[in-house]
Image (cartoon, helix red, strand yellow):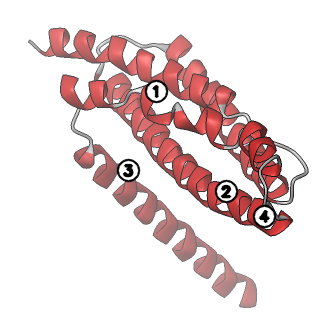
Amino acid sequence: MVVFIGTIAAMAGLLAALFILVRKIVATQSDLPLNAEWIDELSIERYRPMVRLLDERDLEFLRSQPGFTPRMAARLRQQRSQIFRGYLRCLAGDFQRVCTAVKVLMLQSRRDRPDLASALVRSQAAFAAGMTLAYIRLFFYRWGVCGVDPGTLMRTFDVMRLELSALAPAAAGAAA
């Protein structure tokens, strides 16, 4: 009897999770304005400041100034870490929207693209690993141990953005 109740509870949990997942996917698809302006706004240039934000040269310059204290360096590292974390959140959101848009266009396409599907999965895995590494390195940056290079994350985002740009006109031409 206990096994039966446990099985029913597990099934109910799985159904609830499936319902939430489907609802999230449908809501995300309706929120995506798949048009040329939206795709053009997804520029990698928006994230260029990340490259220099955690550059050690600024701290080296501060250290050479009269009145510099280690507390100033700690405060600067803290502030820049917060700003960098904000950039990471925006980049992750944009990457997720691009991937969702690519998935939508793949679903609406008349032609199967297994190559694109596997590239999408690889990009999502690489981006997730890159984000994890960036957050770990950002934690250590704050204490002066190491820096963070957002280049790999930015390139992964840009590849998917370019893929979306290439798919969008093809999808518009197929719909016409």
Of 89 and 13, the residue lying toward us:
89
The residue located at (63%, 35%) in the rendering is: 52
For the residues labelled 1 and 3, say whether their Cβ atoms are less than 8 Å apart: no
Earlier sequence position, callout 2 versus callout 1: 1
Which tag, 3 or 4, sits closer to the chain's start?
Answer: 3
Would you name the residue on which mark 1 appears? 44
- Residue 143 falls in image quadrant: bottom right
Amino acid beneath label 2 = Ser
Which residue is denoted by mark 4 in the rendering? 74
Circles 2 and 1: CB atoms closer than 8 Å: no
Closer to the eye: label 1 or 4: 4
Kindly identify the residue that appears in the image at 63 percent across and 61 percent down.
79
**Mark 1 near mark 4, Cβ–Cβ under 8 Å?**
no
Q: What number is the disc on residue 121? A: none
> Front-most of 13 and 174?
174
Give the alpha-carbon distance from disc 2 to disc 3, as whole Å. 32 Å
Name of the residue lying farthest toward the left: 176
Tell me the distance, in whole angstroms, between the alpha carbons under discs 2 and 1.
Answer: 20 Å
SS of the residue at dot 4? helix
Q: Is residue 59 visible?
A: yes
Task: For label 3, count other residues whose C-alpha is less than 10 Å away and answer few (under 14), some (14-19) or many (20+).
Answer: few
Q: Where is mark 3, residue-wise?
A: 25
